[in-house]
Image (cartoon, coloured by chain):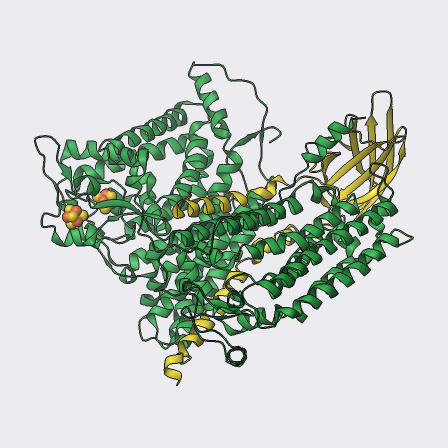
Amino acid sequence: MMAAHSSRKILILSLCSLAWLPALAYGDGGTARFSGNVGDYRMTVFTEPTPLRAGPVDVSVLLQDRQTGGFVTDAAVTISVSHADRPLNVNRVTATTASATNKLFQAASFEFAQPGTWNISVEVDGNQQTESSAFELNVAPRVPRWVDFIFWIGFPVIPIALFGVRESVRYRQARAPSPATAG
Amino acid sequence: MISVDSSFQAILSSWSFDVWIVAPIVLSTLLYVRGWYVLRRRGSQRFGAWQLAAFGCGMALLSIALLSPIETFSALMLRMHMVQHLLLMFLIPPLLWLSAPELPLLCGLPSGLRREWIAPLYRWKPIRSGFAFLTRPPVAWGLFVAATWIWHLPRFYDAALSSGTLHNLEHACFFWAAMLFWWPVVQPYPSRLNYSRWVLLPYLFLAAVQGTVLSGILSFANDVIYDHYELLPQVWGITAIDDQAIAGTLMWLFGMLAYVIAGALVGYKLLFAPRSRQLHFAVAGMPAVQSGVTAYGPPTAVRPTPRRLNRAKHRPPVRQQLPILSPDGDSCHRPARDVLNVPLLGRFLRWNKSRLVLQILMFAAAALVIVDGLLGAQIVSLNLAGVLPWIHWRGFLVLGLLVAGNLFCMACPFKLSRTLGKTLFGGRRHWPRWLRSKWLAVGLLFVFFWAYEVFSLWQSPWWTAWIAVGYFLAAFVVDGFFRGAAFCKYVCPIGQFNFVQSLVSPLEVRVRDTSVCEECTTKECIRGAAATATAAAIPGCELHLYQPRKSSNFDCTFCLDCVHSCPHQNVGILTTLPGRELLRDPRRSGIGKLGSRTDVAALVFLLVFAAYVNAAGMVAPVLDLIDKLQAEWGFASRIPLVTAGYLLGLGAVPFCLVAIASLAGRRLSGDSESALRIATRFSYMLVPLGFSMWLAHYSFHLFTSSGAFSAALRRFLSEFGWRDVETAAWVCSCGLETADWLLRMELMLLDAGLLMSLYVGYRIARDRYLGMRRAMGAFLPWAGIAVILFLTGVWLVFQPMQMRGVMPMGM
Ligand code: SF4
Ligand code: SF4
């Protein structure tokens, strides 16, 4: 049976290691942006985050066989993105299952540097032929980076507030007459 | 296309690891298991395997509901989403209540946290009456139904599906509303409902009726209710409308089953369970809770008649507490642990050559730095003198201080040249009286920080090598001429850095049992042990720290001479609460009272503010500003500007802030002590904050550039004829955006530093002044400095930082 002190150590270690876990977050769906037939496939494209803002963006693709509805994960999926103002500046990334939490998806991460309209093109290289589809996305301006970390910056407020409550409770409890002396 | 098997495999492997879900699950499980074990050890029969299993199953199902493919696929299929909600609302909450989690979770907490934090809040009336209100059957029922219906409105449901935060909020609402709903039904030990249990029958029946209506709407709707699913492709050929109907049916079946089983059990208990079991308050000293209002008392054998019960109901809650929340009833306090008892490590440290081994290893590293710095290629990112001291050593130094204390001092290579100096010249002179303070070290540290920035020391392997050589020479000369460890105590800037930061370390060299020292007449720990037939002489503490009166790590080099010399084996490396030594100001052996050492306070201020100035000297906006001012004002070099910056950052600004805080605190608290004296005592509250900035800064370089060592070593080996350097693509990573996890870590360190500093400051003020008003008056100006420093630190970690080396391409 676990000794009490070793469970405390495990607890501390677990807490420390948990701090690193957010780094493991993968692209995982989000909002469906496109769904349609592309050659022999039914393709659905999701983006994350919602609402879509300039900054890091995950694009995930779900491929299904158009006839049977079965899932397809062995086709090579390449996603290209470019800003509408600079169409020649294309960022092409091969989507992978490893980058997605949902292993039926193939996902890739991009940095959408600017707000505005972005062109997305998805190319599927199956056994027989290559198909592609394109659509546009409206990307809102980026929020300052610190906004994403506001919880970590503002975190001390929580323990400070709790400490304030605790101190005032202790103060009141110390001043209140005990049942024995209250008569 | 892939086969059904492989798509099934893909689904099974689709687990997510959201820290906000994993952390509470892991934490509560550990707390419960620990508390359950403690209660069992104390002989409580209330907590058997059944309770443990119920909690374990509840947590396992919670993980399955929130982390498994059910969560991953809930955005694709409404039926999956429904299964998830049903688990959260109908299965997990009753299981958790059946495990009677209150006492085990309280028992599982560290005793200090339980006594100091939980107990006052637990006894706080608004919390108790708030919980009592929420668990009243009509309120709990209303909240459960409201949560169910509101989150099933298309607008909210669709919103939750497209936002991770809202999705988590939805689940939290379902889960906590269900926890409240099932509380009166299960009545987890040691609680007790103030209502007749008969009320539970209409309670469950009406819940079943509303559940049937909602599932009917989902099952028989002609249109797809949630737009989100309409946009998605069909999965396994099931259309969105069929998916919705299946989800509705699942909801009806599952819900009905839960309500019927619960109703049957409640009915059975009402009709057949012995009345005494329903009414007895407490068993074996364990308390009962009345509708959330704790009413603890000794076990009662009084048979409660309806009249007694009615009277008890209208009596105000008894002002007592759970035994485990009272200091007397808490038997969890444990003595400090000793690193010297850790199996292999303890044995190594007790070996009297252990320190020499560590010093030789560090000496070898220093030799590499000197050789490569003086003779190797002067490419900072590929030279051992460019990367070893400025990335690795500094990073490990602060991490070592964080986890263990003055580890570097223990392995200090300069000790070898100190010993050589003593052997050659005897080291018999006394250190001059006028230099017996930290002022010399303050001056040297200031010069070092200034020179570091002005001459960009980290960019010059050659200069770095000469600094190391200079260090060896200084240690050799000082200790060659002077007694004791004059170099460590009065000169060494690294030592002073370690002494101050190690005030918040969790390990300390100190006596195990003070009563042994009281009986001891020989005092070898400070006088030293004479040579015997079997053992060589062991010196006493060179730093003049007398163990029984030693307090904190200050001035201790972890040399362990006292450990080896004490004939009673009464000195160990014991665990301590980090920062505890900052709260108290006892008279310390060899140091005196820290609160009256202005020189030590100056050292503290210097090191705290240097943490920020040193980091600021590397961030893009500050470097740009220097360049701009240099161009505008026509300076040929940046030396005047950097010097002015240092005088400002380490002189004028700290002086003004400290003077303002000290004078304001003096006025607000009505203290008659001099402002200097007040500043000296409060200086120690800033130690944790300063350390957190050093830690954030140096560990940032360590984590981002740790690979630089391998590159530099390969270049070194190749240049000195051992091996060809593999051709690798290396890029300078200057100005890169910090990875999110690293930024989070830096912010967490700063958060911890701020909280610890504020706590220390508050405790100093409370100890020093009578009355809350005076204490807060003294404390608030210092809290203001802490907040300013914290915000400066936050700003700094968000800036692009100049890097200390190189990283492999693609990292
Ligand atoms: S630490 Fe050892 S040598 Fe020193 S006073 Fe105590 S018992 Fe004596
Ligand atoms: S002998 Fe002195 S410096 Fe060495 S470990 Fe003991 S107390 Fe610290």
Where is residue A160 drawn, in percent x and y?
Answer: 50, 63
- Name the residue located 27 percent from the left edge and 42 percent from the top edge: B558
Relative to residue B785, is residue B608 depicted above or below? above
Question: Quadrant location of ligand 2?
Answer: top left
Residue B192 vs residue B154, the one in the foreground: B192
Where is residue B297 drawn, in percent x and y?
Answer: 42, 70
Taking the view exactly as shown, the residue that stands out farthest to the right is B222
- Name the residue located 40 percent from the left edge and 33 percent from the top edge: B463
Residue B580 vs residue B216, the one in the foreground: B216
Relative to residue B804, is residue B608 depicted above or below? below
Describe residue B404's horizontal placement relative to residue B52 as left or right.
Answer: left
Taking the view exactly as shown, the residue that stands out farthest to the left is B533
Chain that appears green: B
Q: How many marks?
A: 0
Q: Colour of chain A?
A: yellow
- What quarter of the picture does the N terminus of chain A occupy? top left
| Quarter residue B665 falls in | bottom left
Where is residue B18 drawn, in percent x and y?
Answer: 62, 45
Relative to residue B71, is residue B722 depicted above or below? above
Could you tell me if residue B422 is visible in this image? yes
Taking the view exactly as shown, the residue that stands out farthest to the bottom is A183
- Name the residue located 52 percent from the left edge and 57 percent from the top edge: B101
Describe residue B711's horizontal placement relative to residue B559 as left or right.
Answer: right
Residue B403 vs residue B500, the one in the foreground: B403
| Quarter residue B764 falls in | bottom left
Where is residue B154 drawn, in percent x and y?
Answer: 82, 57
Could you tell me if residue B431 is visible in this image? no
